[in-house]
Image: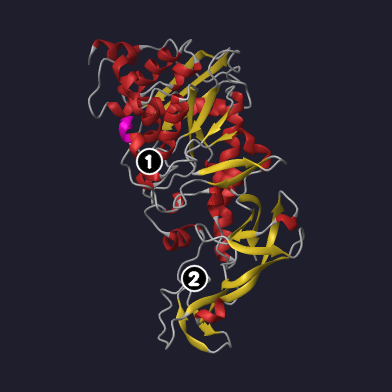
């Protein structure tokens, strides 16, 4: 055992239970046998009275003790830059196995910082006049958010980064998820490589209640919900804005491809320059009162331009592929997830035509979405599509393409930011074309969207996003 490691393995000077009011983070547990708890208070933007408790091997205890020593009187930025590598260096180097203790200690430190960020306590005062503005950047571990951070720094901002841990499930592929423990560590390492202090915030309970449970309930009820719109609008981004405020930051920058415009009555979302990557649809449920505090550094860029910037800046995730699945489905898929979490396994039911004639059987209504063609498994002179699903009778209704055509769509949960008569277009699916339309009414449970030309019926549960020109002026749920 080297001298530094031996010293810290015996150091008990900061060992102890967390004080009342202290911010605490824990990492490890039964799976590895090591458990580290770090706690501290914040006073005037500095760490005060750090404490640690640890169970397990000598290296884990030493890493906890070293972390507390490194944190003592550190500025918030210095604490948020603390890495497993810095803890390992303080211990005089570790074996590949021993490095696990340093990683746990770093996780515990950053979870404590995350708890502080959610506490409502002001962490930093805004910069004094004449100093660079401060910006919080939402980091996912991908190239888009990393380039957003890079551009904010290039524009002269003092940057902090934050990553939300939203979902942790051994059945998922954490490497492909944007909000897993693996993603948090990747985002932290990228931020640190770029010299940015990083905060980890655990919102798993809020995400399960606000996104995953409604997703499961929707499929059980026979609709196809859009969890990303719900997540951005109600769960994920608003807490980060609160953190930005408590950091004294001017706003929150994200790697979304979107922009804001002002129509004279205040800010509204609008599409980004890159049509192929535009994400304003997914942000449509954000309250307009918050839009003035958002920054979209990629608004005028295309994806190839973003990757080129990352390569020139030698950002380590410049060529990292994009995640293609919902974060909580990564590596498992919808069917397996529904079977495990929603008790929606195989349940044989009837496939019928629009007149009620039985054509075949299926393994569960939740495996079908309105408009779906593949997987029906019934021969027909014309291709068959799903017209409807009946959750109560576990029945799937199919028919030919012409039966899907609609020139009006009923929506509920309507939210409008401008008068209904200003609505002239609607987008009924992510990345689908904008459709000319008008609203029959500006409020009510059953508002009818009248389309200028018939289109295939959208799936119930999906989000309808309304535009006036190219600005988003409302959203609703397809009934």
Please tell me how crowded label 1 is: few (under 14), some (14-19), or many (20+) other residues with Cα within 10 Å. Answer: few
Secondary structure at badge 1 equals helix
The coloring applied to the image is: secondary structure
- Which stretch appears magenta? 311-316
Left or right: residue 287 compared with residue 282: right
Height in image: 217 above or below 470?
A: below
**Tag 2 and tag 1, C-beta contact below 8 Å:** no
Q: Position of residue 374 (x, y in %)?
A: 41, 73
Q: Position of residue 381 (x, y in %)?
A: 42, 89
Quadrant for the N terminus in the image: top left
State how far apart marks 2 and 1 are (Cα). Answer: 38 Å
Res. 305 mark: 1
Q: Position of residue 225 (x, y in %)?
A: 56, 59
Residue drawn at x 53%, y 71% is 370
Residue drawn at x 53%, y 51% is 228
Q: Position of residue 372 (x, y in %)?
A: 47, 72
Residue drawn at x 76%, y 58% is 442
Look at the image and tell me whether residue 298 can be seen: yes
Secondary structure at badge 2 equals loop
In the image, 271 versus 46, the foreground residue is 271
In the image, 67 versus 126, the foreground residue is 126
Height in image: 194 above or below 356?
A: above
How many numbered dots are placed on residues in this image?
2
Res. 368 mark: 2
């Amino acid at each position: 055992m080297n001298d530094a490691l031996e010293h810290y393995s015996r150091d008990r000077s900061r060992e102890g239970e967390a004080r009342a009011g202290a911010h605490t983070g824990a990492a490890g547990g039964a799976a590895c046998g090591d458990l580290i708890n770090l706690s501290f208070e914040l006073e005037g933007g500095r760490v005060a009275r750090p404490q640690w408790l640890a169970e397990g091997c000598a290296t884990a205890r030493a890493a906890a003790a070293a972390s507390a020593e490194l944190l003592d009187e550190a500025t918030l930025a210095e604490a948020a830059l603390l890495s497993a590598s810095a803890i390992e260096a303080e211990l005089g180097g570790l074996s590949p196995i021993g490095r696990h203790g340093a990683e746990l200690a770093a996780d515990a430190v950053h979870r404590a910082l995350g708890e502080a960020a959610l506490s409502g306590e002001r962490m930093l005062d805004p910069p004094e006049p004449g100093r660079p503005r401060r910006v919080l950047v939402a980091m996912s571990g991908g190239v888009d958010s990393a380039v957003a951070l890079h551009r904010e720094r290039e524009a002269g901002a003092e940057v902090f980064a934050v990553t939300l841990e939203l979902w942790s499930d051994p059945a998922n592929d954490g490497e492909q998820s944007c909000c897993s423990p693996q993603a948090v560590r990747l985002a932290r390492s990228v931020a640190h490589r770029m010299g940015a202090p990083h905060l980890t915030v655990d919102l798993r309970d809020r995400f399960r209640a606000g996104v995953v449970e409604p997703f499961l309930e929707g499929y059980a009820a026979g609709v196809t919900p859009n969890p990303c719109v719900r997540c951005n609008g109600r769960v994920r981004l608003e807490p980060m804005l609160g953190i930005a405020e408590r950091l004294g930051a001017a706003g929150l920058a994200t790697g979304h491809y979107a922009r804001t415009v002002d129509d004279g009555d205040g800010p509204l979302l609008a599409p980004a320059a890159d049509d192929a990557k535009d994400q304003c649809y997914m942000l449509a449920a954000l309250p307009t009162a918050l839009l003035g505090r958002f920054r979209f550094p990629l608004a005028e860029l295309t994806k190839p331009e973003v990757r080129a910037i990352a390569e020139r800046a030698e950002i380590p995730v410049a060529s990292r592929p994009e995640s293609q699945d919902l974060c909580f489905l990564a590596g498992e898929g919808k069917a397996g997830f529904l079977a495990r979490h929603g008790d929606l396994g195989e349940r044989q039911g009837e496939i019928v035509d629009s007149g009620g004639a039985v054509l075949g059987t299926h393994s569960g209504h939740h495996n079908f979405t309105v408009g779906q063609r593949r997987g029906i498994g019934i021969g027909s002179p014309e291709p068959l599509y799903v017209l409807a699903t009946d959750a109560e009778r576990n029945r799937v209704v199919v028919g030919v393409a012409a039966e899907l055509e609609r020139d009006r769509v009923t929506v509920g949960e309507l939210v409008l930011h401008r008068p209904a008569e200003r609505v002239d277009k609607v987008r009924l699916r992510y990345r689908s074309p904008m459709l000319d339309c008008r609203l029959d009414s500006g409020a009510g449970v059953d508002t009818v969207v009248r389309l200028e030309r018939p289109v295939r019926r959208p799936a119930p549960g999906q989000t309808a996003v309304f535009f006036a020109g190219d600005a988003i002026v409302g959203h609703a749920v397809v009934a």
